[in-house]
Image (tube, rainbow, N blue to C red):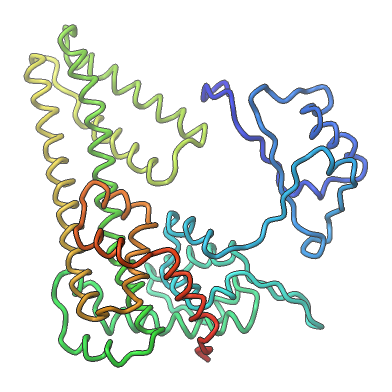
Amino acid sequence: MKDSGLHEGILFIDEINCVSETLAPTMLQFLQCKMFGNQPIPKGWIIAAAGNPPEYNKSVRDFDMVTLDRVRYMELEADFAVWKEYAKAEHIHRAILSYLELRPNNFYRVESDVDGMHFVTARGWEDLSYLLKSYEELHLPINETVISEFIHHKETAMDAAAYFDLFYKYQDDYGISDILAGHVRPQVFARINQAAFDERLSVTNLLSDGLSNYFVRASIEKERTDLWYAFLKKYRSQLSDAKVPSVCYFKLLKQEEQTFVLEQEGNLLNQKQFKNKDWLIKKLQNGIPENNISPQEAFAQAKAEFELQIDISEQAELAASLALERAFDFMEQAFTGGQEMVVFVTDLTIGIESSAFLSEHPSERYTLYNQQLLIGSRREHLLSELARDSEQFI
């Protein structure tokens, strides 16, 4: 609170039902009175806690009625549809999202038999996503053994491994990057017309994944441009009163650096924001004006560098717009009137970068399909039917 200046927040306590019996009275006082011993919780703070059921954790104990009577108690269940929104925002590997679209029942499973407990959790899928991305960068193969290190349910791990093999094969066979560049091989349409629905859905997800890279790039460049513009606006407003432009610039730069440090210490930045702020600081450090130039010359120098960034941002936005139109070209020709368009347009709707891009760069075809396809209800019905009827890959 001293470092960040924030005076309200949430105090989150994990595994609260693992508290020892001797500490239970203290915890009761804490929950009821917002006091831990003689230490009060600051005003404006909310206490939230979480814990696992006893069947999942041998160290937990049940709270008694007296404790439960003093809290708001909620039981939460795993929900792939809800998690997917988070997963899209965190850029969970598209192969995992595509697989779980087809196998939503494998998103969360906990089973016990004579051999012990077998389970699949959201955390397991997310950790596997990080590994998949690292293995791809290192060109290492993904097999069932690797998947089983995170997916502790043999049948699900085998099924996912078989699907991932197909997913990577589809990526090469269909040439997703070529499609988004406007170069579609004629045999691609012949194959997609004969493909089963799981293959068609996988191609749709691959196309969405490739397209999202364009939106992410455009989003990054826009945010960097906006950050730089905000700095230059302050710089220009103070230059008229500055005797030495370099001193004025350096003072504002130090303010940016100090704010960046405080934001890091307060964990106020996500990964994307951190990278963009770090990028801006480095750009500003390289742009300190000379001591012997006028305010007009100093600002012109800073503006010239900024205009190069504007060009980069506009090019990224243009590339994203062209890729989107090419994706729609392919979807219309490959899946005319098909259910795959529902999945594709829904992904555009719920994706953070894609929805932000479309709000500033409207697409007539997106708007048309979004209105026509009754996105939410049709998609949910489609995937629930698919989950019920789909056969195992192995």
Residue 260: give x, y in percent of width and height: 40, 30
Q: Residue at x 92, y 45 (%)?
A: 21
- Position of the N terminus, as image quadrant, is top right
Q: Nearer the viewer, residue 117 or 277?
A: 117
Q: How many marks?
A: 0
Query: Does 82 appear above or below 37?
Result: below
270 relative position to 230: left or right = right
Q: Is residue 242 above or below residue 156?
A: above
Q: Is residue 48 left or right of residue 289?
A: right
Q: Position of residue 199 (x, y in %)?
A: 37, 84
Q: Quadrant of residue 256?
A: top left
Residue at the spot 78% in from the left edge and 40% down from the top edge? 71
Could you say which is closer to the camera, residue 339 or residue 268?
Answer: 339
Instruction: Give how far across and how far down residue 225 sits, in percent.
Output: 22, 38
Q: Quadrant of residue 332?
A: bottom left
Rendered residue at 90%/36% (across/down): 25
Q: Image height check: is 173 above or below 229?
A: below
Residue in the image at 29% along x and 47% along y: 220
Q: Going by the image, does 380 lie left or right of 68?
A: left
- The residue closer to the viewer here, 341 or 260, is 341
Q: Position of residue 321 (x, y in %)?
A: 18, 57
Direction from residue 39 to residue 88 in the image, left or right: left
Q: Residue furthest toward the right?
A: 22
